[in-house]
Image (cartoon, grey):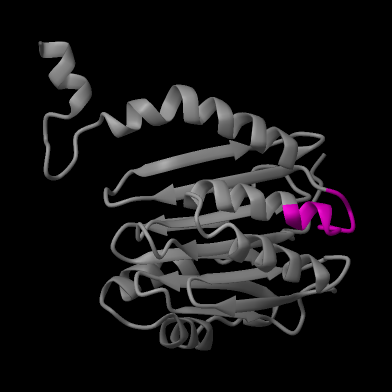
């Protein structure tokens, strides 16, 4: 039996840290596996969250254009102009210069909207109201001294506490890229009764057990990597 599920996502934040230059996306939704299609981050380009009725090409085609130095506004204007489904799309984009832009199609599910500012784009659909996005922005701005991954987790927790999806939540994700092409943070909750709480738990596990390994991997400037250096003595 085939059951068609409407591809609706709850809320997300695409962001850049002004202190470190790191880029990331955090998201929470009422469907499973939000991190699979929504969050897209590329070192040297930017961060994109594509949601509602998802079009992954807004990210896959948009990130190379951002890497050329084009602004998120110009990139989204071009890509959406040739997307026949744009009125059911929602997308937020931030580049390496902290420029941001977002779009909410006229046929996305109420309540739907977005907020942008230097270094962030916050968007949501099927929310209880605009207070969800306002609280995400408030918490994200108030935590500017923390690492970007922690700020994104806090933003997701704040969005859920402010009402979040009016149909509940099921999955969450945080992805952060540093100065290397591989993720520095990639924490995903694909199916949980309380995904924001589970994301917080897994964030702690990742910080203790995974992050040190990632920090010891080879880099462009150090092709050996600290872990291999220690292993070789």
Q: Quadrant of the N terminus?
A: top right
* Residue 94 locus on image (x, y percent): 46, 71
The C terminus lies in quadrant: top left
Q: Examine the rendering and report whether any part of residue 64 can be seen.
A: yes
Determine if residue 85 is in view.
no
Give whichever of 32, 22 is nearer the camera. Answer: 22
- Which residue appears at 76% of the width and 34% of the height? 192
Prevailing secondary structure class for the magenta stretch in the rendered image: loop
Asked if residue 78 lies in the magenta stretch, the reply is no
* Direction from residue 87 to residue 47 in the image, left or right: left
Toward which corner of the image does residue 107 lie, by quadrant? bottom right
Q: Which residues are magenta?
A: 158-168
Between residues 225 and 111, which one lies in front from this camera angle? 225
Looking at the picture, does residue 2 appear above or below residue 52?
above
Q: Is residue 61 left or right of residue 151?
A: left
x and y percentages locating residue 97 in the rendered image: 35, 75
What residue is at 74 percent from the left and 59 percent from the top? 10
Give me the residue at 38% from left, 83% from top: 71
Which of the 4 quarters of the picture holds residue 60? bottom left
- Give above or below for 65 relative to 17: below
Asked which quadrant contains residue 170, the reply is top right
């Amino acid at each position: 039996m085939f059951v068609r599920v409407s591809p609706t996502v709850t809320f997300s934040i695409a962001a850049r840290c002004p202190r470190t230059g790191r880029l990331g996306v955090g998201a929470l939704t009422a469907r499973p596996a939000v991190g699979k299609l929504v969050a897209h981050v590329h070192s040297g380009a930017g961060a994109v969250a594509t949601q509602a009725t998802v079009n992954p090409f807004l990210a896959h085609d948009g990130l190379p254009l951002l890497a050329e130095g084009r602004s998120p506004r110009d990139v989204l204007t071009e890509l959406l102009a040739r997307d026949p489904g744009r009125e059911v799309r929602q997308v937020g984009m931030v580049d390496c210069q902290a420029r941001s832009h977002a779009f909410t199609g006229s046929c996305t599910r109420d309540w739907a909207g977005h907020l942008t500012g230097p270094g962030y784009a916050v968007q949501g659909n099927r929310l209880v109201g605009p207070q969800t996005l306002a609280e995400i922005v408030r918490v994200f701005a108030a935590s500017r001294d923390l690492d970007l991954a922690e700020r994104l987790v806090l933003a997701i927790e704040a969005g859920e506490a402010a009402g979040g999806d009016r149909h509940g939540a099921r999955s969450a994700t945080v992805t952060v890229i540093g100065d290397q092409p591989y993720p520095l943070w990639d924490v995903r909750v694909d199916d949980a009764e309380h995904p924001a709480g589970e994301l917080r738990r897994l964030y702690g596990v990742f910080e203790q057990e995974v992050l040190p390994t990632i920090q010891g991997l080879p880099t462009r400037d150090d092709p050996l990597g600290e872990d291999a250096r220690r292993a070789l003595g």
